[in-house]
Amino acid sequence: MKLLPAVFCGVVVAGAVLVSPVVHADDQLAASMCDYVKADDKNRLRKVLSDYRLRLRNIYDGVTCNGDSLVRFAIKNNAADVGEFIVKQLPAAQVAAGGDAAWAEGNGFAASPLLAVIKERAGGGD
């Protein structure tokens, strides 16, 4: 009888270990990334991702800057180089589903050079 609780605990622990957790960027890393986006410093953003061995596509949804996604934050801060880097690192389906192009046009950022990159990556063409 004592074997049953031990087996149950073992299965629960093994299940917890085998399930891949969603990757969340810690606060300091997210703050650094936001600073680099605001400064339009693509090289430092690349370096921090490399140093932490992260892929942007895996942490993108977990990082917000002043309540905005990295792409929207780049648009607001006219960070075209970093914004283009971010958009090119994300899957096209994620860029299309993000609604950043419509958001930019609706919030007065239609002249942003990043808008063309977003539309091209999302498959919008023009």
Image: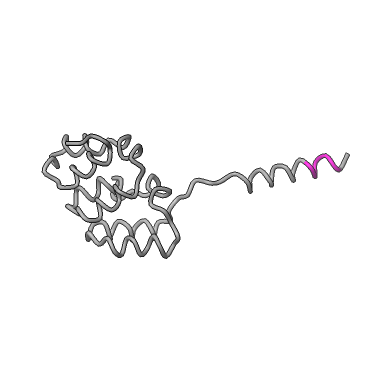
User: What kind of colouring is applied to the model shown?
Assistant: one colour
Q: Quadrant of residue 9?
A: top right
Residue 89 screen position, x and y as percent? 34, 50
Residue 15 screen position, x and y as percent? 66, 43
Residue 41 screen position, x and y as percent? 25, 62
Query: As drawn, is 17 to the left or to the right of 95?
Result: right
Residue at left offset 72%, top offset 42%: 11
Q: Main secondary structure of the magenta part?
A: helix
Q: In terms of depth relative to the viewer, which is nearer, 40 or 29?
A: 40
Residue at left offset 85%, top offset 42%: 3
Image quarter (top left, top right, bottom left or bottom right) of the C terminus:
top left
How many numbered discs sit on the rendered protein?
0
Q: Is residue 121 above or below residue 77?
A: above
Image quarter (top left, top right, bottom left or bottom right) of the N terminus:
top right
Q: Is residue 26 above or below residue 1?
A: below
Q: Quadrant of residue 103?
A: top left
Residue 5 screen position, x and y as percent? 80, 41
The reply to whether the magenta stretch includes residue 98 is no
Q: Name the residue at the right extreme.
A: 1
Residue at left offset 42%, top offset 65%: 51
Q: Point out the stretch of residues depicted in magenta.
A: 3-7
Query: As drawn, is 125 to the left or to the right of 90?
Result: left
Q: Quadrant of residue 48?
A: bottom left
Q: In terms of depth relative to the viewer, which is nearer, 88 or 63?
A: 88
Q: In terms of depth relative to the viewer, which is nearer, 54 or 69?
A: 54
